Image: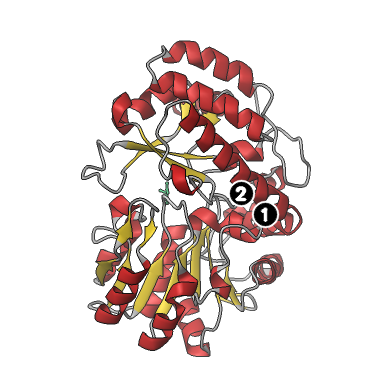
Amino acid sequence: MNEDAQYIRKNVIAHNKWFEECIPMIASENLMSPLAKEMLISDLADRYAEGMPGKRYYQGNVYVDKVETRATELAEKLFKAEFADVRPISGTVANMAVLFAFAKPGDTITTCALAQGAHISTQKFGAFGQRGVESVNYPFNVDDMNLDVDGTIKLLREVKPKVAQFGLSVFLFPPPLKELNDVFQEIGCTVWYDAAHVLGLIAGGKFQDPLREGVNIMSSSTHKTFPGPNHGMLLGANLTEKQEAALRRAVFPGVTSSHHLHAMAALAVTLAEMKVFAKEYAAQVCKNAKALASELYGLGVPVLCPDIGFTESHAIAVDVSEFGGGMDVAQRLEDANIICNKNMLPWDESAVRPSGIRLGAQEMTRVGMRESEMKEVASFIARVCKGEDPAKVKKDVKAFKKGFTTVRYCFHEGEPAYAYKKLVE
Ligand code: DSN
């Protein structure tokens, strides 16, 4: 090894060690199972496949085809979908495929605003803008952190979008799809749901069931509440053959060539694991998020939406303006080994200096934490918010985390969550 390689490796090992001693609470992250990690270092990582199983442009895909076919079947079964495509290599790439398939430059798509928790790909400077679509934002009710139903119905009738898009990155409550169904039918729009944040909850029967609530196409990443690899997926219902073909063409050759076969295999085994564990896991994630929120609120840390149970998902939004704002608090929490992100709240104008932080309970659920541990986590966060020296809190966090370093809700439960397989010392 030369000095450069040593430097890289040393820092990656240091990262692993650090995260073992941290409480990671980024709402868009999770831990893969040992089996999924094994897939990532298989020979599939070095190979190419283009097209569909049985119709490839490369030789050497005998076993890849079997894996991909089973992954597709597992995805269709788990989400009761009529259509699945496991080839998008990320959530944003899945979103780009939907844009390519269902919208032309100049078409209008309705969506949420960034400050309301929307994902950057839905914005003018993101994939929506790159595709040249016009986006119109729904009216949003800040008290409920959800769409204003009457206003949304009115807007949909006025704008008559080609596609109505739903799904957020601060995704606390299910959008009222059932209430909007009649207007979807009336205007004949395609209904698109970005499930990235809540895919693992949907797999376990929590949050909502978009494909049964009028959604035609669900795009997603596969590594947030769904504890798989960094990858993407499309799931559909009530699509025409033409629409399904357009989606497949948009994925390849539209927005991918090969589709990261090792990640696709890791997704496949995670789908197999979620078939067994999703229900129990998703229920505990939701209980933990609520427990974390109510404990923090009780400690005087203003979590949003106290009157409606704080959240129905894995995530909570916290207004930390009285403690120095999102940027400052997120940094101090990192200094205490609690990892989260600063986040805009609906009334914020700056994404760089927002008043909020976003916290997710899914990863700590994955390592076995339950409601009682959420109380401890809340007390660490409250201590930092209220100005205690982060270095002091960090000591307690490190001691506490020692009991939670193995992965749950998967095959090979109890295997190290942050293991680094060393080639040499
Ligand atoms: N950036 C991710 C999030 O944190 O929500 C989504 O891609």
> Could you tell me the amino acid type at mark 2?
Pro
Which numbered dot is residue 270? 1
Quarter of the view holding residue 16: top right
Q: CA distance from mark 2 to mark 1?
A: 7 Å
User: Within 8 Å of ligand 1, the CB of disc 1?
Assistant: no
Q: Please name the residue shown 38% across and 29% down the image.
A: 330
In the rendered view, does 243 fall on the left or right side of 149? right
In the rendered view, does 10 fall on the left or right side of 351? right
Q: Earlier in the sequence, mark 2 or mark 1?
A: 2
Mark 2 lies on a secondary structure that is loop
Dividing the image into 4 quarters, which one contains the C terminus? top right
Q: Is residue 243 above or below residue 10?
A: below
State the image coordinates of residue 381 (x, y, percent, origin top left).
47, 25
**Farthest front residue?**
307
Q: Please name the residue shown 62% across and 23% down the image.
A: 401
**Badge count:** 2
Which numbered dot is residue 227? 2
Front one among 5 and 271: 271
> Could you tell me the amino acid type at mark 1?
Thr
